[in-house]
Amino acid sequence: MMESRSAHAPWSSLQLGRGDARFHPELSSLTHQHISFLPHFLFCAELQPIRVRDEPNQEVVIAGQVVFPRMRKTRSIMSKRKAKDVHLPTGESITQVQSMLRERLCNQRLPDKPEGTEAQHKHLLELLRRTAIHGESNSVLIVGPRGAGKTMLLKCVLRDLLEDKEAQKSLLQVHLNGLLQTDDRIALKEITRQLHLENVVGDKVFGSFAENLAFLLEALKKGDRSSSRPVLFILDEFDLFAHHKNQTLLYNLLDVSQSAQAPIAVVGITCRLDVLELLEKRVKSRFSHRQIHLLSSLTFAQYLQRVQSQLSLPQDFPDVKFAQDWNDSIKTLCEDKSAEGALRRHFNSSKDFRSLHILLMLCLSRVTVAKPVIKPADLLEASRLCFVDAKANMLHGLSILELCLIIAMKHLNDVYEGEPFNLQMVHNEFKKFLQRKSNSMYNFEQPVIMKAFEHLQQLELIRPVDGSAAKTQKEYQLMRLMLDHSQIMEALQKYPLCPTDVKQWAMSAFG
């Protein structure tokens, strides 16, 4: 019934009869993958010569027929079945959740469709498409409060625009920011650098301001609309460019956009509604006066829906069961009364998505293997951290002398109804407090008090009055207190080991 393995390695030959397959000792030489499909062929009625190769992913010949394709098909079906039932360890699932949601909340991935700004998206895309493809010059302002989604809207439009091969091939982009390019000279150098023009060597731009401007305008005017490549100028913090001397850069860019020269589009992004009032008459006359407003009309129900969509996992998450449990827990969270109260407080203070994303990031950071879902308590704690008073917290780290000076300033504010004060007035008020005390615990020399006063100024708890003379002696320079009464009293209650007499002095009517 049995023939020993032949010496022709790596092949081995077996002769098996009916019913011998499961008991045959030679099966120990077969690989695991082969054993899974051998019964389909071994329970044949007649003796068959069988040749089996031990290496994986190699064909197997039985009775002169290749049977490996059947095994591969079987394995692929099994792998698909396993893919549907993937169950990752909790720690690995949480790591993937945090990575995916951080990417979403930190705006590292643009949404497929901008929510609530579909009309503005369509308008801006059509405007820029006419410049990129048809060579039509345009200018437009995107206006809205900080965190309203102005930059995200523009990025989504550019992504959709560059899907067109013609636009991707021809369009040049120049990105400027009013916080970085603080005058026209720096802005011109940045433009010539980004456009890779001839007078740039490395990172250095040669020539005077007038030469650079003339060179840039000549480069933009070269050729006609049909032969010149369209240029898109994006001016972030557009209102800051209006403060540049004579608004030379804005004038020349808008002048080119209005004349039959090179096709350019100027897109300004600003949070000031009165930005057009900042423009000179000659600049305003060359602007198209197109404005796209992003003013939030969000309701609280839409806000809650946004929270749920931002924290929910997609259907293609590897561990389907974990994703289902996570999404159910997020739905329960949004229906919880205490969580809803915290979200309503945020909604009433600020409707912008940036502050919402900060809140959700703090919630996400509290998810662990031991606590794999976001609880209402996590949302309440994150809300408390968002609303924490940074200046009141700063008072906890002050010395007793600095705290006494702050209290003296508070009393001066009460007496003189918010009028500015100087160091000498604060020192005199502090001396009144010391005169009531028999001990000399708080007696400090004038230089020490001066140093404490300067430290408070460095922390920006006090600041000089605008227009105060720089030549005035430090003791007589007028200051204003940047804290209100409630912040000081709250800080005193939480100050570690605060002396009782100092607390009583702070609570007394006029010191």
Image (tube, helix red, strand yellow):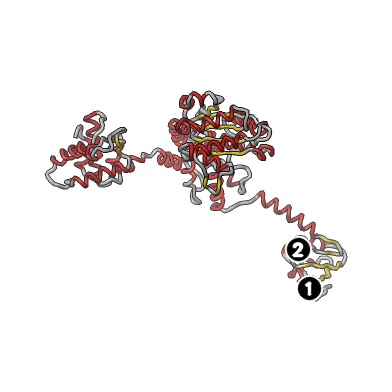
The amino acid at mark 1 is: Ala
Q: Residue at x 30, y 32 (%)?
A: 467
**Where residue 131 sits in the image (x, y, percent)?**
63, 32
Sort mark 2 into few (<14), some (14-19) or many (20+) by Cα contacts within 10 Å: some
Q: Is residue 218 above or below residue 292?
A: below
Give the position of the N terminus as an image quadrant.
bottom right
State the residue in front, 425 or 30.
425
What residue is shown with label 2?
34
Q: Secondary structure at mark 2?
A: helix
Q: Is residue 79 above or below residue 182?
A: below
Nearer mark to the viewer, of 1 and 2: 1
Does 126 sit left or right of 36 as displayed?
left
**Where residue 206 sits in the image (x, y, percent)?**
52, 44
Residue 384: mark in rendering = none
Task: Determine if residue 52 is in view.
Answer: yes
**Where residue 421 sits in the image (x, y, percent)?**
24, 34
State the residue in front, 487 or 369.
487
State if disc 2 and disc 1 touch (CB < 8 Å). Answer: no
What residue is shown with label 1?
9
State the residue in front, 55 or 162.
162
Q: Residue at x 65, y 50 (%)?
A: 85
C-alpha gap between disc 1 and disc 2: 17 Å
The amino acid at mark 2 is: His
Does 317 sit left or right of 436 as displayed?
right
